[in-house]
Image (spheres, coloured by chain):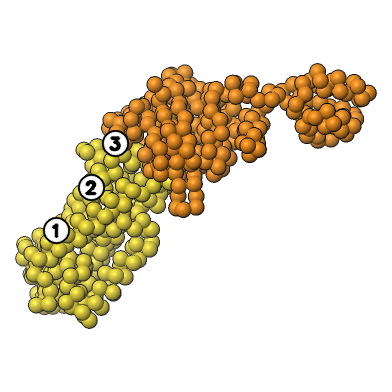
Amino acid sequence: MPVIKAEHLSKRFGKKVLAVDDVSFAIEAGTITGVLGPNGAGKTTTLRMILDLVRPTAGTVTILGSRYRELHAPAARVGALLDSSGFHPGRSGRNALRVIATGAGVSDARVDETLALVELEGAAKRAVKGYSTGMKQRLALAAALLGDPEVLILDEPANGLDPEGMLWLRTFLRKLATEGRTVVVSSHVLAEVEQTVDDILILSKGKLLAQGPIHELTASTQPVVRARSPQAEKLEAALISAGAAVNRLNDALAVRGPSAAEVGEIAHGHGIALHELLTEQPSLEELFLQIAGTRREQ
Amino acid sequence: MIGLARAELLKLRSTRTALGLFIVILLVTLVPLTVLIFAVPKDWLETDGVSGFLNTASAFVPLVLLVFGILGMTNEYRHGTITYSYLVTPHRWQVMAMKLVVYAVAGIVTMVVAVLLVYVVIRLGGAVRGVSIDATGGSTFGDYARQIVVAGLITTFGVALGALFRAQVITVAGVLIWALAIENIIVVLKPAIGRWLPFTVFNTVSAGQMSGGGADAVTTDMLTRPQAFIVSIVYIAIVSVAAVFISLRRDVT
């Protein structure tokens, strides 16, 4: 049984904004699932609907077999990081967590444990208003972990993190998944989660464009052939006339359509020298652009 | 529910808002009272000068408690902490109900402490100056009890208003303007309507608080105290139910 199951989920704000449009998906236990898409794709609204913070206009969503509000001791089963600014600025980091922990029936010892887990124990007594964005993000992550939950829902957890912080987050998420937890992580920076997630949901303009294991989705898309040539302009013309899609930047070309062997044959046939020729699986960003482009064409 | 109550109390203790407002209450009551006791002639202290002052000074306390209640709720929206409150307790009515109860108790405790401190300051001041001051300011135990009950009611009313109108500055300013000016004008111009208005009703219950006036504010135009008490409860119930209803339907974005 999936941990999270959404069926025909829609959310309309007012009459004009359709934030989520008939989205259905299932998230399996023990996976890291990336909810990906540009700003305004409907990622945050979808996550908030899972957590009963936003009421769906249509459709249903269940987590651990029931609606969030029907879960017994929900904070102990589901942890959420939705907004790093969700703390009173005058409260210390530790007290901010204690407020949440007390309501959830979690001990102060666990508060200190999670502070240590996100490496904030040194700043625990400082007021949140003195925290950097990265520190607030870590505090929000600590809040999500307070109940030692089996499911974690993290909305843009890398926001405000420096490269070191992002590396820390990637390692941390992977560690959580190896402990058997289900992690749902949204991001608009696709490259940021590419190395972390197992499955992806791609959203754009409120619609679900694709869902599945990341390796399957990238394998199902066209690879990109990279070529470098001192006669790049001539090679570009030859490839286009052969029906390929080509992007050229100076002497480098990104070719979609023909295989690397076919590009080599075309170059040879036109007497064009090649300095480099290789096949690349598309990045998540390219995958998104391909999927979004395909949908637009439809 | 016990955890929820403890969390609300921790929220009160872990920021400076509650402490700051308590200090304001002490400043508007104890500081002028101390100055009064040590600055005026002894014979004036032995008349009813202090009781007149106490009635005026204590009129500010419910207003501060009203603001305290409004801030208690609007701060949740302003700082986004409402998200965590609803994640921990997804049945939103429970969050609202507990906040109403905890703030009612906090309002009552604050008023009890303020009354006791005023009593202590008058006793000590009188002893130092060698005069006998009527520390009750002419009030009976019943008067104090009503003031304390109204403190709880008005703090609760503030919480409910804060849940209904989330915009903090606009709510505080609007409510104070209404309580201090608009409602008083209506009471003067249209007493038949004015006597039913919320702050006039609270004033009638405590007889001498909110919007000025003393015991003589309870005139034939006003509701009786039992009537006013019932109407004040109805006001709080209506605003609280509306606040719960809206919070159930409101998206937390």
Q: Colour of chain B?
A: yellow
Is residue A235 toward the left or the right of residue A81 in the image? right
Above or below, A290 against B174 in this view is above
Say which element carries label 3.
Answer: helix
- Percent x, y for residue A283? 65, 28
Q: Nearer the viewer, residue A170 or A45?
A: A45
Residue at the image position 66 percent from the left and 32 percent from the top: A290
Chain of the residue where label 1 is placed in the rendered structure = B
What's the CA distance linking mark 1 and mark 2? 18 Å
Q: Which chain is orange?
A: A
Chain of the residue where label 3 is placed in the rendered structure = A
Is residue B221 toward the left or the right of residue A208 in the image? left
Answer whether residue B226 is visible to the viewer in this image: yes
- Percent x, y for residue B191? 18, 78
Above or below, A28 against B51 in this view is above
Q: Are marks 1 and 2 in contact (CB under 8 Å)?
A: no
Q: Amino acid at mark 1?
A: Val
For label 1, the residue is: B149
Is residue B152 toward the left or the right of residue B139 in the image? right
